[in-house]
Image (cartoon, rainbow, N blue to C red):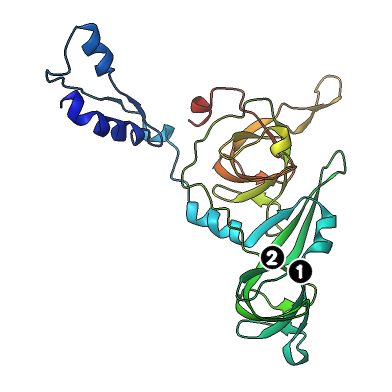
């Protein structure tokens, strides 16, 4: 290829060269050509060199659709006082106690005619295990609705879809416009992060690969989208055979979690690797070894 004709193509090749689990090295053809006194008028052949890595060292594809589905159904409110300012359901049509898809209901708050909204129910209350600090309030999505008309601060909505029955006092929020990154760059945090698995959304205590977990660390602790944390399980208790003293054995590396939605005080992460069943309370921390080695 010639430098003038294909410099744009080379740039495109570089942008797509980094693939999951593979290291791609491109010979610096431009620098070599200049060092050899070659002119751009002459044809310079560039040959990419690829170092193959065994499949066991690669990271599997990230299921973005599953993550998008989760983000559509779960949100976190940092400040509980903010709940008082949100719109909420006051009643169902025709004195219905519960409503579903196709029904009309009434809500109170700042809503706009013709707009679509998500309907949420207050879920888990996340607090720090050691400090007792409130880290966030989880909102679980139960449906979607559209505002048909407004009368003062009362809005008439039609329920477009629902996965649970809609009840009075359910929260009405604008649908989040923030999209999910189409690409993740897994990397270790810039500083030391040390925390715990807060919960497994859905009300269970255990998690495996490609499941979502809530973490008790967030943006204020330096976490960003794509940061990977190592999961460590607490060592077992054992008795010293000579003294009878109770000993706590060292912890065991159990998996890797990648942060995909950080909030101020907590985050949601996706379990990318699990060599053991992960559990609420397991420790998460910055990888002690190079991330590429940890991913093997």
Residue 173 marker: 2
Helix, strand, or loop for circle 1? strand
Residue under circle 1?
87
Q: Quadrant of residue 263?
A: top right
Q: Which residue is located at x 46 percent, y 43 percent?
A: 183
Q: Vertically, is 134 above or below 68?
A: above
The N terminus is located in which quarter? top left
Q: Quick one: which residue is furthest to the left in this view?
A: 42
Q: Position of residue 242 (x, y in %)?
A: 83, 19
Q: Vertically, is 226 above or below 155?
A: above
Q: Residues within 10 Å of mark 2 (few under 14, many from 20)?
A: many
Among the two numbered marks 1 and 2 on one chain, the one whose residue lies closer to the N terminus: 1
Q: Which residue is located at x 19 percent, y 7 percent?
A: 37
Q: Residues within 10 Å of mark 1 (few under 14, many from 20)?
A: many
Q: Vertically, is 287 above or below 172?
A: above
Out of 244 and 265, give the one closest to the viewer.
Answer: 265
Q: Which residue is located at x 65 percent, y 64 percent?
A: 174
Q: Which residue is located at x 16 percent, y 21 percent?
A: 45
Compared across the picture, whether 259 is left or right of 281 comes to: left
Residue 280 marker: none
Out of 49 and 157, give the one closest to the viewer.
Answer: 157
Q: Are marks 1 and 2 in contact (CB under 8 Å)?
A: yes
Out of 95 and 65, give the one closest to the viewer.
Answer: 95
Q: How many marks?
A: 2
Q: Quick one: which residue is furthest to the front in this view?
A: 152
Q: Position of residue 129 (x, y in %)?
A: 83, 42
Q: Position of residue 10 (x, y in %)?
A: 26, 30
Q: Quick one: which residue is furthest to the bottom in this view?
A: 94
């Amino acid at each position: 290829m010639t430098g003038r004709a294909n410099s744009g193509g080379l740039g495109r090749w570089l942008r797509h060269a980094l693939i999951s689990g593979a290291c791609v090295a491109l010979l610096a053809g431009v620098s070599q050509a200049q060092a050899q006194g070659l002119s751009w008028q002459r044809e310079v052949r560039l040959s990419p060199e690829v170092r193959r890595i065994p499949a066991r060292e690669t990271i599997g594809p990230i299921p973005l659709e599953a993550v998008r589905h989760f983000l559509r159904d779960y949100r976190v409110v940092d400040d509980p006082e903010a709940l008082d300012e949100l719109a909420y359901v006051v009643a169902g049509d025709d004195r219905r106690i519960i409503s579903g898809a196709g029904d009309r209901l009434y809500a109170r708050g700042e809503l706009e005619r013709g707009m679509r909204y998500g309907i949420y129910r207050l879920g888990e209350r996340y607090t720090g295990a050691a400090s007792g600090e409130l880290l966030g309030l989880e909102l679980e999505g139960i449906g979607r609705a559209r505002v048909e008309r407004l009368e003062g601060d009362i809005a008439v909505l039609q329920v477009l879809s629902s996965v649970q029955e809609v009840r009075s006092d359910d929260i009405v929020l604008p649908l989040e416009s923030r999209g999910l990154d189409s690409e993740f760059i897994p990397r270790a945090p810039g500083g030391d992060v040390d925390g715990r698995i807060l919960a497994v959304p859905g009300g269970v205590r255990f998690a495996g690969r490609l499941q979502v977990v809530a973490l008790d660390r967030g943006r204020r602790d330096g976490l960003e989208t794509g940061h990977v944390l190592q999961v460590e399980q607490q060592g077992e208790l054992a008795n010293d055979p000579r003294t009878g003293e109770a000993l706590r054995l060292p912890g065991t590396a159990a998996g890797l979690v990648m942060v995909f939605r950080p909030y101020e005080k907590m985050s949601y992460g996706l379990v990318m690797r699990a060599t053991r069943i992960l559990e609420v309370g397991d420790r998460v921390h910055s990888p002690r070894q190079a991330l590429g080695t940890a991913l093997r």
